[in-house]
């Protein structure tokens, strides 16, 4: 089973926006690394904004 293309684009956009990483930098990460970075950035945003909602929540 392949990882949904739409999810890859969401992760790429999220990391590029918040971390200012290039497409190549994001695509060098494997699936688990991308998800981890997205969770970490979401956690920082949550702390800074004092909200309950993750910016990029994974299920």
Image (spheres, helix red, strand yellow):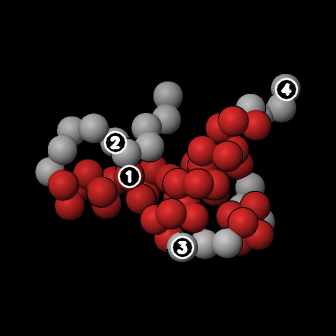
Secondary element at image label 1: helix
Task: Decide if residue 53 is on the left or right side of residue 33.
Answer: left
Gap between marks 4 and 2 measured at Cα: 27 Å
Q: Which residue is mark 1?
A: 42
**Left or right: residue 41 compared with residue 38:** left
Cα separation between marks 1 and 3 = 15 Å
Element under disc 2: loop
Image x and y of residue 44, in percent: 31, 60
Residue identified by numbered label 2: 54
Closer to the chain start, of discs 2 and 3, is: 3
Q: Nearer the viewer, residue 40 or 19?
A: 19
Local crowd at mark 1 within 10 Å, few (<14), some, or many (≥20)? Answer: some
Q: What residue is rendered at 38% in x and 52% in y? A: 42
Q: According to the image, label 4 marks what residue?
A: 1
Q: Answer yes or no: do the residues labelled 1 and 2 have beta carbons within 8 Å?
A: yes
The earlier-in-sequence mark between 1 and 3 is 3
- Residue 49, horizontal then vertical, whole percent: 18, 55
Please name the residue shown 55% across and 60% down the image: 15
Residue sitting at 76 percent across and 37 percent down? 5
Which residue occupies the extreme left position in the image?
50
The residue to which callout 3 is attached is 20
Q: Residues within 10 Å of mark 3 (few under 14, many from 20)?
A: few
């Amino acid at each position: 089973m392949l990882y949904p293309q739409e999810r890859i684009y969401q992760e790429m956009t999220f990391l590029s926006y918040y971390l200012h990483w290039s497409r190549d930098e994001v695509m060098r990460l494997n699936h688990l690394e991308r998800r981890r970075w997205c969770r970490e950035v979401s956690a920082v945003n949550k702390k800074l904004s004092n909200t309950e909602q993750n910016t990029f929540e994974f299920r």
